[in-house]
Image (cartoon, rainbow, N blue to C red):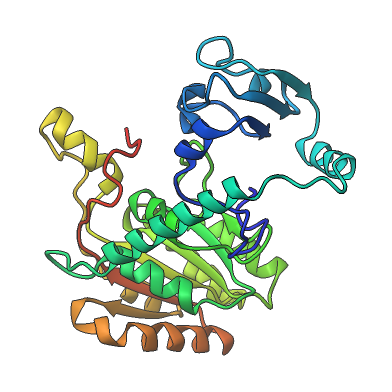
């Protein structure tokens, strides 16, 4: 939920290489963060680090402790209130700047590597990283990003930068796909002046594409960008090497843009032949939402190795 809290370009926000930073840290503050699979059950924490854990829930506060990690101080309470009080108590204190600056330099290096990978040609269709970078560059500063998917959304989490607090909504730790349409509807109704983007995988889109009817009837124009690779790629990436079968992972390059048209929205099919016009199509989609029409960008994407090694199954 804290994505976007520091804006999109804060010098003290490190988006990449988190594991390396945690290994180097003298002190780690887990402000509501849980030592579950996302932190490798605490194994990514340095045993020499002092660790302060804050959580409302005692079970979550101490999850997997005494196995791979142990809190130096465990505080059962609201993480937000704790941070506010801590900030007041540390008024006037300044940390040495060398380490944050080195982390930021590593962050920039990783971002540049990701951008270089976005320029690589895929065997078929468009490079998904290039599409996500282009959307991030063109989306408005008041945008809200709704993420609903697996592989495509996992890539988006590394590339797209929420512009402010509460401007990133996703399915949560357990990957409850299908929230995209409802989240986007709620976001647009609560903040009608904001540009609302739904980043869909083609698998997860099937759960809520019918909400384009709702977007039309209730005049809630949002923009959906669908990474269409005709596959449940996040599952397939590990299922095939482990089981030697792609069963139940294959989908089709479905004409989702026509579905959006049928529900009263506006759909675009975007393939490799449209690469040079990608920015123009995105700007046109933004213009049409300003005029009251929900838009779906059905983007045919190819395969990359960007997320090899990520937790999938």
Q: Is residue 60 above or below residue 304?
A: above
Q: Is residue 156 above or below residue 22?
A: below
Q: Position of residue 108 (x, y in %)?
A: 45, 60
Q: Is residue 130 above or below residue 52?
A: below
Is 218 situated left or right of 179 in this image?
right
Say which residue appears at 38% left-offset and 55% top-offset.
155
Q: Position of residue 277 (x, y in %)?
A: 30, 87
Q: Is residue 162 above or below residue 66?
A: below
Answer with the quarter of the image where residue 238 lies: top left
Question: Is the C terminus in the top left, top right, bottom left or bottom right quadrant?
Answer: top left
Residue 67 appears anywhere in the view = yes
Residue 170 appears anywhere in the view = no
Is 203 situated left or right of 288 in this image?
left
Q: Position of residue 152 (x, y in %)?
A: 35, 56
Say which residue appears at 58% left-offset and 45% top-offset.
99
Closer to the camera in the image, 54 or 9: 9
Residue extending farthest top: 66
Answer with the quarter of the image where residue 184 lies: bottom right
Q: Position of residue 123 (x, y in %)?
A: 11, 64
Say which residue appears at 33% left-offset and 59% top-offset.
113
Answer with the quarter of the image where residue 185 lies: bottom right
């Amino acid at each position: 939920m804290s994505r976007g809290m520091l804006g999109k370009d804060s010098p003290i926000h490190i988006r990449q290489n988190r594991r390396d930073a945690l290994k180097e840290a003298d002190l780690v503050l887990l402000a509501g963060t849980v030592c579950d699979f996302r932190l490798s059950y605490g194994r990514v924490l340095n045993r020499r680090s002092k660790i302060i854990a804050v959580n409302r829930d005692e079970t979550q506060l101490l999850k997997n402790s005494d196995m791979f990690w142990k809190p130096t101080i465990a505080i059962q309470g609201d993480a937000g209130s704790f941070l506010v009080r801590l900030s007041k108590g540390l008024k006037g204190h300044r940390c040495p700047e060398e380490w944050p600056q080195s982390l930021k330099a590593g962050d920039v290096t990783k971002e540049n590597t990701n951008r270089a990978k976005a320029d690589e040609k895929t065997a078929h269709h468009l490079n998904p990283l290039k599409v996500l970078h282009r959307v991030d560059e063109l989306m408005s500063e008041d945008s809200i990003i709704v993420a609903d998917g697996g592989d495509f959304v996992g890539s988006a989490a590394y590339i797209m930068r929420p512009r402010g607090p509460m401007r990133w909504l996703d399915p949560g730790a357990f990957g409850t796909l299908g929230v995209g349409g409802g989240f986007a509807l709620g976001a647009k109704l609560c903040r009608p002046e904001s540009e609302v983007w739904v980043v869909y995988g083609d698998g997860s889109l099937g759960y809520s594409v019918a909400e384009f009817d709702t977007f039309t009837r209730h005049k809630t124009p949002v923009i959906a960008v669908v990474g269409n690779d005709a596959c449940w790629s996040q599952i397939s990436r590990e299922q095939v090497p482990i089981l030697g079968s792609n069963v139940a992972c294959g989908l089709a390059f479905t004409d989702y843009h026509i579905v959006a048209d049928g529900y009263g929205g506006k759909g675009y099919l975007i393939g490799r032949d449209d690469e040079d016009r990608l920015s123009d199509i995105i700007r046109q989609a933004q213009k049409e939402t300003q005029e009251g029409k929900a838009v779906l960008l059905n983007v045919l994407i190819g395969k990359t190795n960007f997320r090899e090694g990520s937790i999938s199954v």
